[in-house]
Amino acid sequence: MTTPAGWRRDGNLPNELTSFVGRTRLLTTLRQRLGEHRLVTVTGIGGVGKSRTALRIAHLMRSQFKDGVWFADLARLQDSGMVRHTITSALGIADQSARSADETLIEWLGDREILLIIDTCEHLVDACAALFEDLLRNARGLTILATSRQSLNARGEYTVTIPPLTVPGDSPGEDVFTNEAVQLFAARAGAVVPNFMLDEENIGPVAELCRRLDGIPLAIELAAVRMRALSVEQILGLLADRFSLLAGASRTALPRHQTLRAAIGWSHELCEPAERLLWARLSVFAGDFELDAARYVCSGDSLPAEDIMDLISSLVEKSILLSDGTPSGHRYQLIDTLRQYGEEWLDKLGERDRIRERHRDYYLQLASRSEDAWSGARQVYWYVRMRHEHDNIRVALDYCLRTPGEVQSGLKLLSSLWFMWVACGLAREGRLYLEKTLELARQPSVERCKALWVLSYINSAQGNISGAIEAAEQCSSDAVRVGDSGAVILATKMLGTAAFLQNDLQKASALLGVAIEFHKSGRELNPGLLPSIVELSMVLLIQNEPAEAEVLLRDCIAVCTQRGELWLRSYAIYALASVCQAMGRSPEATSNAREALRLKRYFHDVLGIGLAIEVVARQALEDGQPVLASMLMGGGQANWRTFGMPQMGSPFFNSEHDRCVKECRRILGDEAHEEAFSRGRKLNLEELIVLALGDHEDGQVLSG
């Protein structure tokens, strides 16, 4: 099973999809500078290889950072206020808390030894500079390598400018066959024409071609792809014609900017008309995308849907698109420089607004499909799939927020993805978007009602009970006005959840009972029926009625198992572990708590993991393992503080935690307890889960 990024120590570096050629001296310099400075910015023109070089040095140096090398791409981010959150998300931090993003990110970084790669900062220079200064001031083990077309002018920044590759003639006496620009052309040409080799006949034209392209890697790679159909001499001749046509076209552009534009433009002209049109339309996507998305968004008006696959394959062959396999299917991506070129053409064609609307429509439909399927057998698939679509979801939301008349669509998109915000570790982002969108949509509507109960759900998960109650009461009031009975019941359920977290058990029992009765005959399992059952069972347990709670939970687990639902099933099994514990059935309690944890590893559900860890810790204490219990409590508390409000602010959960800690301290003594508790605090979430599951080597973890 793949471990979510934020639970690992090794980071989230993307794979290198092509071989890295040359730059030996530059890589040595970068390695030295990263050892001497905590903020290094790699600058240079578009297409010179900033991102590729940063990725290469990151892979070379990953063993030097014990807590991993992490990568965040800001290329499609427009809102400077989201820079910190985007980095938090890239680190895999499932932030369930209502605290500021500043506190969360700094606390997570703490004393970790991390290299953070921040790609494409030039359009957010001020926000990046301020953030990087703040992070470096507060996180002593952090080193940042940024890429930007210009310096950030941040305090402590060291700038390394990436020059184009050396071309034949730059170094007197150099063997032209070993020149790095020539080597890059040969490597890329050999990838498209397997029998291509440099020899005495072609070395002259290849060397001249590299000189004409000023050693710019992207320009050289685009030219090399043409070896499928042309000789080196033909490529050189056509490129010379192209340059003469553009001579003087831009008196203000630097020569190398003109060179890159000419190379991209030439590559663009050599594409078929349908390929050029698809290139422009694909520029609307953020990050990567799947074939079905391209078919939906880009087809129509001269591009039949059935032709999209062949056209995409052709653009991959021409190195316009990158292609990569993922757990949720094959995906494609335009590199940033080529995407910007495509955006310019999309504007010239007058299609920008129409294609962005199509893009929004696709992801709105995808969100609706994922919501409908969430409680079924493909739940893990939809978790992985929607995490992959995260960047495109943001672009679609941005369109809704910035385009007049589209706010209702924004509400639909946000509320359909309730499970993504609540179950997949993106609570803070969901809350920020919901609050911003609800502020723009003040009039009561069905869409607004749904968004309000989703906001209430998120606030509950974050431990912001007053915010949860306010959103649920507003939802109920609006729902009555627009005649939305379903929203009234879901608001009732959310108020029941809030009452449970406040320990108002009588009120919680009544409200959750209403929600269960309403949903019993329906087919909607989440977010109405199943969460209500689990929460009511916990109310019954607190009221010292564990047998009744067990009956509810057994039924809930049976329904989940029948439907293939895993997320709420893990909560039901966790609650059953608590019930077994209360009834003195220790082996069952341990077994169920661990089973809940195993299921939760499929999702980035840190809230549920925190609750299950507490049960395992209490059971370890009862089983005569106070050191293990103290470590689990320490690790659990540290992760609670990182990801959310400890125990969601619930008096019941807090009292159970405090009771266990107090008993551990009594048995072990202050010094031994604090030592074990401190060791637990140093564990990341995956290590904590391994400890709780008993998958560790006893002597290795428990002895420290």
Image (cartoon, rainbow, N blue to C red):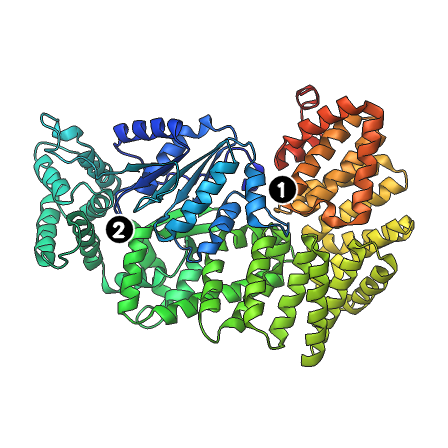
Query: Spatial distance from mark 2 to mark 1, Cα to Cα?
Result: 45 Å
In this rendering, position of residue 171 left or right of residue 221: left
Answer with left or right where residue 10 lies relative to residue 638: left
Kindly identify which numbered label has been placed on residue 559. Answer: none
Quadrant occupied by the C terminus: top right
Q: Quadrant of residue 399 in the image?
A: bottom left
Per the image, the residue denoted by label 1 is 642
Observer-nearest residue: 302 or 133? 133
Residue type (three-letter) at the residue carrying disc 2: Lys
Q: How many marks?
A: 2
- Say whether residue 670 is left or right of residue 430: right
Quarter of the image for residue 669 reads top right
Tell me the crowding category of disc 1: few under 14, some 14 to 19, or many 20 or more residues within 10 angstroms, Cα based: many
> Which residue is located at x 69 percent, y 80 percent?
481
- In the rendered image, residue 318, in percent from the top left (x then y), is placed at 26, 51
Q: Quadrant of the N terminus?
A: top right
On the image, the x and y values in percent for residue 688 come to 66, 34
Image position, residue 233 (x, y; %):
9, 45
* Residue 73 in view (yes/no): no
Q: Is residue 56 visible?
A: yes
In this view of the protein, which residue sits in the foreground, 635 or 412?
635
Q: Relative to residue 160, is residue 519 depicted above or below?
A: below
- Number of the label disc, if any, that sits on residue 318: 2
- Name the N-terminal-most of marks 2 and 1: 2
